[in-house]
Image (spheres, helix red, strand yellow):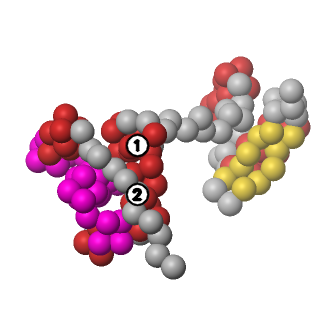
Amino acid sequence: MARRPVPIKVKSKDLKTIGQLIKRGVHQARVFMRALALRQLGQGITAPQVAAALPLTPKAIRQIAHRYNSNSLEAALYDKQRPGAKPVLDDSQKQRIVAMVCSKPPEGRARWTVRLIVEEAVKRKLVPKAGRRQSGFCCKATT
């Protein structure tokens, strides 16, 4: 059973903006593809037909059309700002760890290693506890 086409009427002002975006400047590939998809949808081409011409799925194209219809051109082209992860260490903890690493390494060690930094930071109670991750170490501050 085929999906019903998303009714979309792209405003002429938005089509002009899309045309300028496509012709000029350097943009993220994602933004460029979304602009191309919107322009084609505005010409009456269906999502599966647009998907055949662009490296996007019909579902992604329909989502772009829904975001344009419900919000604006900006919402259709650009992603929302993401909050990101909370900082693991506060500024004073970072400063104390940097000061520790700038000092001489413990007796019997030639230099600081990541594991040694973690061990010493926990031993000196600069951070409450620490755990290893694949990319390095992670200090978990308790609040």
What residue type is disc 2 on?
Val
Secondary structure under the numbered disc 2 in the rendered image: loop
Relative vertical location of residue 129 with respect to residue 66 in this rendering, above or below: above
Residue 116 falls left or right of residue 102: right
Q: Nearer the viewer, residue 42 or 36?
A: 42
| Mark sitting on residue 69 | 1
Q: What's the residue at 25%, 72% (across, down)?
A: 53
| Mark sitting on residue 136 | none
Secondary structure under the numbered disc 1 in the rendered image: helix
Q: Which of the 4 image quadrants contains residue 79? A: top left
Residue 29 falls left or right of residue 58: left
Q: Which residue is mark 2?
A: 6
* 10 Å crowding of disc 1: few (<14), some (14-19), many (20+): some
- The total number of labels drawn is 2
Res 40 seen here = yes
Q: Which residues are magenta?
A: 20-49
